[in-house]
């Protein structure tokens, strides 16, 4: 939006007569219903007071108060984007203050909620996932939804175990946990959503910049940890035992919930984890990981048809 001074100068230059242009401007401002209402409520203001502060009345009338003149927040027409004027008086002095407009308040609230959802490669379609958009009558997801609702009910005081959601590709496992993360944000409970292949890459890259311990500690301590698509990544024995194992051990001891999605049942995942070392199978170490998974989560099968096809 152009400055008040520029707008007034342009307005005045449109007429050869300064006085004529000024009187026209004054008349149009004073005809505004919101100005008339303001002056009626503040009848202590004399004509001289009004004329002396006419620019403030113009500033007030030229701007949007409740986003009615703005198609979107990033197209706000006001002097300060996202802030709407409020008019008041102190004695005979007209005062303008600026508060956040409805769209700015909504935008900031959305950012505040999103700050509770941290992620490593959380797919864009999951950022707006909501339990309100889930078919609650779907028998193939009913048990998972029921357990998630119970978790949310208890989350602020005594959270129960997480869930290990397993089933074929595309049945909505990740969407449900994205919706869970957003529902937790509504409760101001922080979660960390991790896509497992990206998690492995993140840990590998952090070895070189000496941030690995800091990152592992973050995954250990976050109130709710969500590991998406476990078993799809290529894990080395070191990652399985020293990273994933250490995180799950800590969370098991501290009774911190973990949610998982996987295409594998726990028995199938154990086979996958035992094959981390291509030279020799390590069934015992894999079984130890599975036992930790069981301690922090409850397995729930999700079947059904591929919803992405």
Image (spheres, helix red, strand yellow):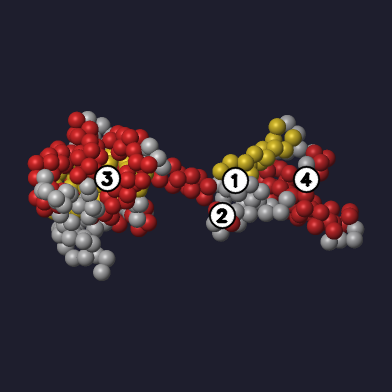
Q: Which residue is mark 1?
A: 83
Label 4, secondary structure: give it.
Answer: helix
Label 3, secondary structure: give it.
Answer: strand
- Give the percent coordinates (x, y) of residue 72: 54, 56
Reading the chain from its start, which is encountered first: label 2 or label 1?
Answer: 2
Q: CA distance from mark 4 to mark 2?
A: 29 Å
Q: CA distance from mark 1 to mark 3?
A: 37 Å
**Which mark is drawn over residue 226?**
3
Q: Nearer the viewer, mark 3 or mark 2?
A: 3
Q: Which residue is mark 4?
A: 54
**Which mark is drawn over residue 199?**
none
Residue at 70% in and 32% down: 90
Reading the chain from its start, which is encountered first: label 1 or label 4?
Answer: 4
Does residue 14 appear left or right of residue 86 in this picture? right
The answer to whether mark 1 and mark 3 are in CB contact below 8 A is no
- Give the percent coordinates (x, y) of residue 229: 24, 53
Q: CA distance from mark 3 to mark 2?
A: 33 Å
Q: Nearer the viewer, mark 4 or mark 2?
A: 2
Name the quarter where the N terminus is drawn. Answer: bottom right
The answer to whether mark 2 and mark 1 are in CB contact below 8 A is no
Closer-to-camera residue (226/114): 226
User: Can the viewer see residue 142?
Assistant: no
Name the quarter where the C terminus is drawn. Answer: bottom left
Residue at 68% in and 40% down: 96
Q: Residues within 10 Å of mark 4 (few under 14, many from 20)?
A: some
Q: CA distance from mark 2 to mark 1?
A: 12 Å
**Which mark is drawn over residue 74?**
2
Closer-to-camera residue (126/271): 271
Closer-to-camera residue (211/58): 211
Q: Nearer the viewer, mark 2 or mark 1?
A: 2
Q: Nearer the viewer, mark 1 or mark 4?
A: 1
- Give the percent coordinates (x, y) of residue 4: 74, 50
């Amino acid at each position: 939006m152009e400055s008040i001074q520029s707008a007034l100068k342009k307005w005045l230059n449109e007429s050869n007569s300064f006085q004529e242009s000024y009187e026209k401007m004054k008349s149009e401002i004073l005809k505004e219903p919101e100005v008339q209402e303001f002056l009626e409520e503040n009848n202590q203001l004399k004509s001289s007071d009004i004329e002396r502060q006419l620019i403030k009345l113009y500033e007030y009338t030229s701007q949007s108060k409740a986003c009615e003149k703005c198609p979107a927040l990033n197209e706000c027409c006001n002097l300060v984007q996202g802030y709407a004027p409020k008019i008041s008086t102190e004695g005979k002095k007209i005062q303008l203050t600026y508060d956040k407009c409805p769209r700015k308040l909504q935008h900031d609230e959305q950012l505040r909620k999103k700050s509770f959802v941290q992620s490593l490669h959380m797919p864009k379609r999951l950022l707006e996932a909501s339990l309100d958009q889930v078919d609650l009558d779907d028998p193939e997801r009913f048990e998972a939804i029921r357990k998630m609702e119970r978790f949310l009910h208890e989350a602020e005081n005594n959270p129960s175990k997480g869930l290990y959601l397993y089933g074929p590709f595309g049945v909505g496992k990740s969407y449900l946990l994205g919706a869970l993360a957003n529902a937790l944000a509504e409760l101001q409970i922080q979660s960390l959503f991790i896509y497992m292949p990206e998690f492995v890459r993140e840990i590998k890259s952090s070895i070189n910049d000496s941030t690995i311990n800091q990152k592992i500690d973050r995954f250990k301590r976050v109130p709710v940890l969500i590991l998406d698509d476990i078993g799809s990544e290529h894990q080395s024995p070191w990652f399985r035992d020293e990273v994933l194992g250490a995180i799950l051990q800590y969370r098991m001891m501290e009774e911190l919930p973990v949610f998982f999605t996987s295409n594998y049942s726990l028995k199938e995942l154990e086979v996958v984890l035992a094959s981390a070392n291509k030279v020799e199978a390590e069934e015992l170490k894999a079984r130890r990981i599975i036992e930790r998974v069981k301690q922090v989560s409850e397995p729930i099968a999700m079947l059904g048809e591929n919803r992405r096809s």
